[in-house]
Amino acid sequence: MKLKGRHVVISLILLVSGFLVAYSYQHSKDDPKVVQLSEQKWEKNYEYRKKAIELVDKNKELREELETKLQKIQDLESEIAGKEELAGQYVEQKKQLQILTGKLAVIGDGVKVTLNDANYIPSEENVNNYIVHESHIHKVVNELFSAGAKAVAINGQRIMEDTFIACIGPVISVDGIEYPAPFVISAIGDPEVLFPSITLTNGVKDQLENENIEVDITKVNDLKMDAYIAGDR
């Protein structure tokens, strides 16, 4: 009787276990779409993430390319600006040289130095000791250029680097053009520098006056000098 009872219990356990296994299998078979749908969603999410990563990488690549091109543009702009600045310097240097050589008209503040023969000449004295000579004019012109004058003229005639000044009796010849006294030497430059350079104690003005030459110097605004034209001399 005990042996039969064991068999009955074992049979019952096996029956229940078989039923549970069969039920589980049937349940999973009846609802396979749940697992399949989850896999599809996972695959779609994976594809979306993959495309998002690809877009991020592409954007990074494009951004780096853009930054490189922007840097090249900045380099080109700097190079062009440097060339423009250099060209501007060349133009300014050329302009200054043309002014110094009299090729350009120039206008600006400056001074006028007027040299005149002595107002009184004693009868017993040599008249040559009381009139303006080319050496007197040279002193003034040289002093003005040394003080930074941009342009100088004698009685309106521009002084060039090769200008020839000569004394012919009572007149002065400037490149073959004769002028009687008074001689007006105009200079364009900083009046606050040019004026003291002539009026300095024991300077040009004092030296000329000691040689019986009348000297008058004034500051002038908007002084204009025409350009030298070939054939004027």
Image: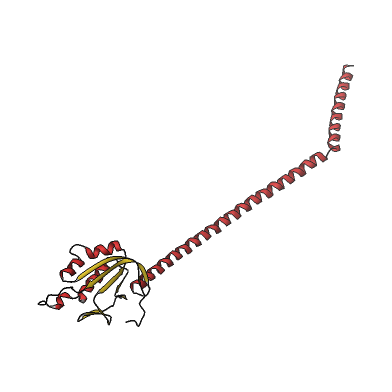
Query: Which picture quadrant has residue 159?
Result: bottom left
Residue displayed at 87% across by 24% down: 12
Q: Can you name the residue that lies furthest to the top here?
A: 1
Of the pair 91 and 205, the residue shown nearer to us: 205
Q: Residue at x 18, y 66 (%)?
A: 206
Q: Residue at x 15, y 78 (%)?
A: 128
**167 horizontally vs 108: left or right:** left
Horizontal and vertical percent for residue 95?
38, 70
| Quadrant the C terminus occupies | bottom left
> Taking 210 as reference, is 178 left or right?
right
Tell me residue 169's x, y (percent): 19, 81
Image spot of residue 148 (x, y percent): 29, 66
Quarter of the image that includes the N terminus? top right
Identify the colour scheme used. secondary structure
Q: Position of residue 203 (x, y in %)?
A: 19, 65
Q: Nearer the viewer, residue 142 or 44?
A: 142
What is the count of numbered marks?
0
Left or right relative to 76: residue 33: right
Residue at (83%, 36%) from the top-left corner?
28
Q: In this view, which residue lies farthest toward the left?
A: 124
